[in-house]
Every structure is written in C-alpha cells, then in structure tokens.
Amino acid sequence: MGEPNPRHPFRARVAEHQRLMGTFVKIPAPSAIEILAGTGFDFVVIDQEHGVFDRTTTDMALLACKASSISGIVRVPTLTADGILSVLDCGAAGVLAPHIDSVDRARELVAACRYRGGRRGFSAVTRAGGYGASPMWKHVDEADAGVAAIAMIEDPIGVENIDDIAAVEGLDAVFIGRGDLTVAYGAATRDDPTVVLAVERIINAASRAGISVWMMVDRVEQIEPLAAKGASSFIVSSDQGMLRDAARQIMHDAQRLAKGIETSI
C-alpha cells in the first residue's frame, strides 16, 4: 500500500496481484476523498451505481483523487461506452462495471477502456490527457497501460460463464459481488454453501486466467481468510459506513460514561 506512482500505473499494480486496499465513496464531497487518502488507502471507488454522483460531482471527486495522490476507480451504473468514456476523460484509474455475466459484456467493458484494440473515443484535451499537454500517442499508451478494467460477477449466469469471462483478453480483475449473489440465489447469508461455492468457482477461474480477484469486506478481520483463498484487493466498507460506525461508537461511549456518572452519584 502507498501513494500511486505515475511510472507504475494502477493497472500494473492490479496485474501484479498486489495487496490493495480501498473503500467505497458514496457521499459526493471531495473532502471525504482527501481525508481517506491521508490514511493510506491505495484507492477509492466512486460509486455512481448506488451513490448520488453525476458527471460534475464525479469530476470533482476524481480531481480530489489527483490532488491527494490516490487512485480513483469509478463504479459505473451501467455498461455504456459513453458513461465509461466520461469517467476516463475525468481521470479515473479504473472502471468497475456491474453485472458482467457474459463474454460479450466483458469484451464491451474492455473495449470501452482501451484505445488500441478498443473503442475508447480519443481526446487529449481532458484531465486524463493533461488538457492537451500530452502528445497523442503518449496519451494513448499511458492510458491503455494505466486503466484497469474490473468486471463485477454478481449474477448466477455470470458464475456459470466465469471461465470464459475471466479469459477475455484485456480484463484485469473480477470483483465478486457476494451481496447480489446472495440475493440472486435466495440464500440466507453470504456464508450459505451456495454462495461460498460460487465464490470459490470465481476465484479458481480467475487464478487459471491469471487475473486478480477483488472482494468487499465489512471489517479488516475478514481480509486474511479471503486472501488465503486467492483474493488480492479489498474494498473495506464505505465513507457512509465509517461515518455511521464512528458516530455510533461516540454515542455508545457517551451513554456508557453517562451511566457511570449516574451510578456514582
């Protein structure tokens, strides 16, 4: 973990299966990203799917990432070329795309993230291109080398197709959406055997394809058992979750102290 190195782009860190740790950002406030960056997280995931980010707030969030030297990943709400192009132009270091359940959708994701061999629309007069300061082919090469394409596997059909999805050329990682899988399978919890077997199947397919596995955890204590199974990057909670937990702890401590004072009187 540490500050991103422009000579060692985020995509390369993912390809090396480095232990990376980040968190979801759901509140569109640049200061939240500045604060999180100061704690040592490797990346943040700006959540357009379940957060309240639009083009303007996403742009400001990615500006905060650049200013704070932390890699900014964007979870897009849908798999569309224009939506992905927008976040890449704003400087996203990676795209997390939901409901990738087929080879065709995985190829669409990769194509939208790449210039060479892909369909990313070219412009160097964006933040990603240094607002025109970067020569055309330098920008193309740096963008293709730097942007990570991450597929969310969160549907039973995606699990069934995982070997072919993981083998798609240019796909950098799979994120296992245990919450969606739990709901889709009608399981009681994500520890249900059906979900556990699906997770193992995804990890094994990713291992055979040589790509990394991302997972979300609620607490850091959950990381090591999942790392032992083959996961390498972890999204820990969210800005909302951390705010809630900290506030709840403050209130718990205040109530405990107040009861202690009352008892001593």
Image (cartoon, grey):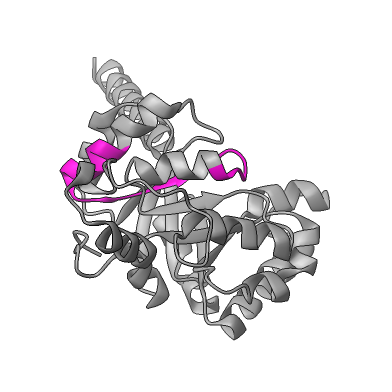
Which residue is painted at 35% across and 27% down in the image? 247
Q: Quadrant of the N terminus?
A: bottom left
Is residue 59 in view?
A: yes
Which residue is painted at 61% across and 85% down in the image? 208
Residue 220, percent across and down? 40, 58
Front-most of residues 100 and 193: 100
Which residue is painted at 27% across and 30% down in the image? 30
Membership of 72 in magenta stretch: yes
Q: Quadrant of residue 27?
A: top left
Q: Quadrant of the C terminus?
A: top left
Front-most of residues 47 and 189: 47
Front-most of residues 18 and 190: 18
Picture mark count: 0
The magenta region covers 62-81
Up-down relation of residue 65 to residue 26 (above or below) = below
Which residue lies most toward the bottom here? 208
Residue 151, percent across and down? 58, 59
Is residue 249 in view?
A: no
Residue 248, percent across and down? 39, 29
Drawn side of residue 62 relative to residue 68, left or right: right
Drawn side of residue 229 relative to residue 65, left or right: right
Q: Quadrant of residue 163?
A: bottom right
Membership of 153 in magenta stretch: no
Which residue is painted at 43% across and 36% down in the image? 241
Up-down relation of residue 144 to residue 249 (above or below) = below
